Amino acid sequence: MARHTSSTQVNFTPEQMYNLVIDMDRYPEFIPWIVKSRKYDIQENHFMSEMTFAFKGLRETFITEDHFVPNEKIAIRLVSGPFKNLESEWQFSAVDTGTRIDFFINFSFKNRLLDLTLGPLFGEASKRMVDAFKQRAMEMYQK
């Protein structure tokens, strides 16, 4: 199983960063490997999501259940898709200069071939996830 963790600080509020991450319908606008993303069955503290990613001609879709605490945390757990395991979490903590973002993701693919071909690519994409949101925050909030 691959695991990636990332922590960083940004000069934006927890609410601003949370709003970018929770607005997954817009991911295809700024995350190059995500070609489709949507929320549905939205409840008081969770929703279902469907996301399609594409790398090097391979395209896969997965469904997760996402639990959230507004402006603080989003926890994501696999429901179905090409993964044997997928869980990730975003945490947003206020600090003097803005927000500390803590992100982690654990994943492995069901199929050994996918694990060998997509695993490294998905791992690299996961490492760049926080940077994609930092860049999006600069575009959205530094006008």
Image (spheres, helix red, strand yellow):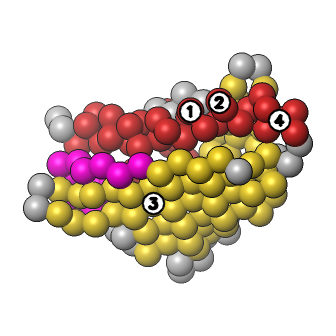
Residue beneath the point at 54% across and 41% down:
126
Q: Can residue 55 be seen?
A: yes
Magenta span includes 16: yes
- For this view, does 24 lie left or right of residue 133? right
Whether label 1 touches label 4, CB < 8 Å: no
Magenta-colored span: 6-19
Whether label 1 touches label 2, CB < 8 Å: yes
Please, which residue is most extreme toward the top here?
56
Please tell me how crowded label 3 is: few (under 14), some (14-19), or many (20+) other residues with Cα within 10 Å: many
Q: Mark 1 or 3, which is nearer the eye?
A: 1
What is the total number of numbered labels drawn onto the structure image?
Answer: 4
- Could you say whether the residue bearing mark 2 is in a helix, strand or loop? helix
Q: Which residue is mark 3?
A: 90
Coordinates of residue 107 in the picture (x, y in percent): 68, 51
Q: Earlier in the sequence, mark 3 or mark 4?
A: 3
Q: Which residue is mark 2?
A: 121
User: Label for residue 82?
Assistant: none
Spatial CA span between label 1 and label 3: 17 Å
Q: Which residue is mark 1?
A: 124
